[in-house]
Image (cartoon, rainbow, N blue to C red):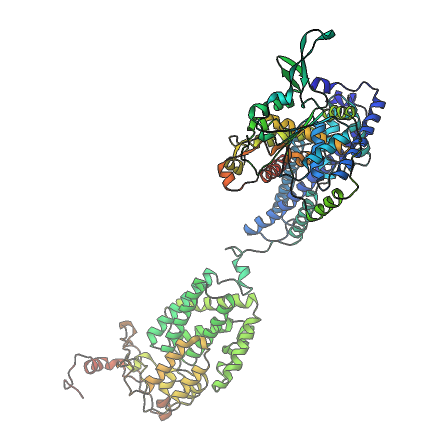
């Protein structure tokens, strides 16, 4: 996947710059289109776009009825991507996701042959609804597809379409009969986005937009090629050694057993951010900078995406949970301390 | 790195960063000079303070040694501070990348300049995104503020201005004297410095000699004055007394001393009069010395005291020094005289010559209560308040005399007033009795060599004149009748043994 992403578009410098600017304009139009349909969640929309440009996947955690499905469907429509939805249940099997071999009439109508029937994971955008209701075995099949970009069935590896973007949801309040995702698997999600309850004005706006005769239909503003090009350019965004150093310091500061950790981290954190978290942090910062029309990573970019990129990678211990420690507050506090120390 | 710079195109960013580096070095040079000037200024101030502590006086640059020291210190401080700060700046000189980072932070370029500079340093922009970044940085560099933005320079300038002002003050303001042993005499004249050791010693000598004289004469007034001199010396030693207060007390005590010895004659009186003659006119005119003999009652006391205080306030350092020189001459005279006393050695008050042997060696302090009071001593007793002796000699106004004397005393000399009150109480007792119940009698046994030789003409008894007899303040029997007197007036003799 990375080799494919690292291939620069084979255009001349002038034309390539022009195409970059055009793509960025279309990206901005797509953002505005999604915002028009999905009311009152601008930050979540931006985070979804950042994860898409970074080539990551998003775990959305929110109570039901806050527009998760609407967001995914709108994204698919605006980006003109093939969308599949998988409703995870306890009896869902891995083959129900990845696909399976079936018997089919042989060539020229003679005999029977096995034919691979692709599962719903074979799509450019997958909505894995209530992922924590499926068994770990089924969850693992999806997570493997997310991580590798391929599916292996009966010893045969099948490549997933590009771009491949998974948005999984889980309900944080109804845990009975669910299978909580292990931390190692949660770490494979690029972002963990939490949907907050909308404000009074936003609720009124949602009611007005969705209960009338006129239905908001999203229009396509980009194509899969644009997404792939943006994913490539995102990785080209330079990052200064200063920002890179701050990210490294920050990641080490989240580890309670290291000297760089603060007293609160040592006391309340069970384990901190892995190097994969540092990759996600920098990649997300690059995507955010590019999405804002800038071509370098700034401290503000890192700070803005630190919470969705790291909140599921920091595990608070029992004492921290008892003390009501919020991971988002801890992340912001750590970033302030590290940035001040670096300057 | 230089080769790398040469390889780089002279972009706007490169030029802007080099301008920023020049600005930083200019700022560093200004900081270095400012710190050096500040250090040199404070060095001059330190030399000024050191000169003051060392007791040197006068302008800093008036003395070759002090000016040389100040110049050397200023030059050393300037060079030392210059080298240290310059070395510090040389070590901490920022690279172009650091300058780009500072510009990013200060001018909110969101790390665009530093990232672009790193891209350029890494060999140039090879991707479209990197080229877009460098292009954006070039645009930003056109309007880049390359000033150093050093806020510390303002603080350093303030420190330098303060240091220069202090140095200017140190240069133009002479170093004041410090109350050391060498400058004490100079400082003593301003009324603020304490007495010198010599002056305190003079006061102690005066007290000692007056106490000796009082011991010999039994004069309580003189004893009180001696005690006051001793107390004054003690207070001056302990530092509880200012110079002006000491001068005022000395003048008052001299006034009382003049009063005590006035009309008594003898070596003490002459010594005191000689000393009083040396007291400066400024002090004398305003002190009780001037009005002591002329005052007729205590109502003049207030005016005299005010005059004395005014005189002390306006006294010059020379006046103060003369005061103690007069005391010293008094001490010298008393010591040279071998112990002067109130005892008259020359002509009596009325001009009658009285020989010591005429009274048979018996003390002359015994007043004749039956004798008429002579005019002279009586007048003095009323006017000057000659306390105990005058009161005893006077047939009237003993209390007046004591009262007048007490009225002339300042409040600070309460011991003297107490002595005077005691003298008054004693005068009211029957003769030959004191408040302690003892006789007031001093027996002086003449020496063998004082006896008149046989070759000399015998002393004839003078003709009896009533007025002269009344003027004699003491009576006695001739030395030739000493054995008789000794037989009848010695404590061991019985009352009926050969009594006439």
Quarter of the image holding residue B474? bottom left
Q: Is residue A52 left or right of residue B456?
A: right
Picture coordinates of residue A284 (x, y %)? 68, 30
Q: Is residue B186 above or below residue A337?
A: below
Count up the numbered dots: 0
Pick the quarter of the image with the N terminus of chain B.
top right
Quarter of the image holding residue B127? top right
Front one among A101 and B388? A101
Q: Is residue A183 above or below residue A1?
A: below
Picture coordinates of residue B114 (x, y %)? 73, 30
Front one among B22 and B289? B22
Q: Is residue B108 above or below residue A183?
A: below
Picture coordinates of residue B455 (x, y %)? 29, 77
Q: Is residue B146 left or right of residue B352?
A: right
Front one among B249 and B46? B46
Pick the quarter of the image with the C terminus of chain B.
bottom left
Q: Is residue B359 visible?
A: yes
Q: Is residue B113 visible?
A: no
Q: Residue at the location (38% across, 79% down)? A: B418
Q: Is residue A194 above or below residue A205?
A: above
Q: Residue at the location (46% across, 86% down)? A: B383
Picture coordinates of residue A225 (x, y %)? 78, 23
Front one among A53 and B354? A53
């Amino acid at each position: 996947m990375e080799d494919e992403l690292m291939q620069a578009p084979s255009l001349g410098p002038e034309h390539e710059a022009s195409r970059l600017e055009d793509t960025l304009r279309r990206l901005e139009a797509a953002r505005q289109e999604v915002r028009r349909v999905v009311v009152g969640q601008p930050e979540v929309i931006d985070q979804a776009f950042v994860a898409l440009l970074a080539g990551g996947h998003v775990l959305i955690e929110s109570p039901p009825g806050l527009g998760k499905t609407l967001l995914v469907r709108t994204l698919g429509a605006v980006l003109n991507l093939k969308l599949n939805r998988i409703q995870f249940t306890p009896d869902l099997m891995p083959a129900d996701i990845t696909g399976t071999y079936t018997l089919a009439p042989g060539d020229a109508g003679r005999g029977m042959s096995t034919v691979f029937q692709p599962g719903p994971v074979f799509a450019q955008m997958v909505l894995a609804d209530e992922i924590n209701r499926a068994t770990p075995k089924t969850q693992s099949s999806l997570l493997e597809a997310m991580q590798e970009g391929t599916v292996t069935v009966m010893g045969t590896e099948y490549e997933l379409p590009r771009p491949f973007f998974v948005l999984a949801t889980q309900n944080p309040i109804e845990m009975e009969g669910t299978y909580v995702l292990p931390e190692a698997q949660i770490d494979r999600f690029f972002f963990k986005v939490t949907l907050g309850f909308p404000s009074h004005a936003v609720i009124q706006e949602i009611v007005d937009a969705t209960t009338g005769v006129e239905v908001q239909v999203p229009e396509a503003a980009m194509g899969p090629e644009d997404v792939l090009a943006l994913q490539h350019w995102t990785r080209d965004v330079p990052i200064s050694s200063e920002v890179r150093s701050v990210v490294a310091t920050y990641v080490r500061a989240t580890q309670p057993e290291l000297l760089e950790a603060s007293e609160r981290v040592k006391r309340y954190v069970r384990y901190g951010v892995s190097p994969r978290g540092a990759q996600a942090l920098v990649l997300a910062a690059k995507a955010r900078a590019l999405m804002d029309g800038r071509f370098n990573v700034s401290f503000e970019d890192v700070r803005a995406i630190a919470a969705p990129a790291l909140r599921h990678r920091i595990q608070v211990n029992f004492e921290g949970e008892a003390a009501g420690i919020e991971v988002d507050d801890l992340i912001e506090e750590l970033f302030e301390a590290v940035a001040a120390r670096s300057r | 790195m230089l080769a790398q710079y040469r390889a780089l195109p002279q972009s706007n960013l490169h030029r802007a960063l080099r301008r920023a580096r020049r600005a930083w070095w200019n700022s560093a040079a200004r900081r270095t000079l400012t710190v050096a000037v500040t250090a040199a200024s404070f060095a001059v101030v330190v030399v000024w303070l050191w000169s003051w502590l060392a007791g040197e006086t006068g302008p800093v640059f008036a003395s070759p040694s002090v000016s040389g020291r100040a110049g050397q210190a200023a030059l050393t401080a300037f060079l030392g501070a210059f080298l240290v700060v310059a070395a510090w700046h040389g070590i901490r000189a920022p690279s172009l990348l650091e300058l780009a980072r500072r510009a990013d932070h200060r001018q909110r370029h969101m790390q665009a300049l530093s990232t672009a500079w790193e891209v350029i340093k890494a060999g140039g922009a090879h991707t479209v995104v990197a080229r877009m970044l460098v292009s954006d940085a070039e645009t930003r560099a056109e309007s880049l503020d390359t000033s150093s933005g050093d806020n510390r320079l303002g603080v350093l300038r303030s420190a330098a201005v303060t240091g220069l002002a202090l140095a200017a003050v140190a240069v133009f303001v002479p170093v004041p004297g410090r109350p050391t042993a060498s400058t004490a005499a100079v400082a003593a004249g301003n009324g603020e410095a304490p007495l010198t050791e010599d002056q305190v010693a003079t006061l102690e000598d005066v007290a000692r000699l007056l106490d000796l004289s009082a011991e010999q004469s039994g004069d309580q007034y003189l004893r009180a004055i001696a005690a006051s001199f001793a107390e004054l010396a003690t207070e001056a030693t302990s530092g509880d007394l200012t110079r002006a207060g000491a001068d005022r007390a000395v003048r008052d005590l001299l006034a009382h001393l003049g009063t005590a010895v006035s009309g008594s004659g003898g070596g003490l009186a002459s010594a005191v009069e000689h000393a009083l003659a040396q007291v400066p006119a400024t002090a004398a005119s305003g002190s009780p010395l001037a009005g002591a003999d002329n005052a007729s009652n205590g109502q003049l006391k207030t005016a005299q005291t005010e005059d004395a205080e005014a005189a002390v306030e306006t006294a010059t350092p020379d006046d103060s020094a003369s005061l103690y020189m007069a005391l010293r001459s008094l001490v010298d005279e008393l010591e040279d005289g071998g112990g002067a006393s109130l005892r008259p050695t020359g002509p009596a008050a009325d001009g009658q010559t009285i020989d010591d042997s005429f009274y048979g060696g018996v003390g002359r302090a015994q007043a004749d209560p039956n004798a008429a009071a002579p005019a002279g001593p009586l007048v003095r007793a009323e006017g000057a308040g000659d306390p105990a002796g005058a009161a005893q000699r006077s047939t009237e106004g003993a209390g007046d005399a004591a009262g007048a004397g007490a009225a002339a005393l300042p409040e600070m000399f309460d011991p003297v007033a107490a002595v005077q009150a005691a003298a008054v109480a004693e005068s009211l007792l029957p003769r030959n009795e004191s408040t302690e119940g003892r006789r007031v009698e001093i027996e002086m046994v003449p020496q063998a060599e004082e006896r008149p030789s046989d070759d000399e003409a015998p002393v004839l008894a003078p003709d009896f004149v009533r007025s002269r007899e009344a003027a004699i303040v003491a009576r006695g029997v001739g030395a030739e009748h000493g054995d008789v007197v000794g037989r009848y007036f010695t404590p061991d003799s019985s009352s009926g043994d050969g009594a006439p």
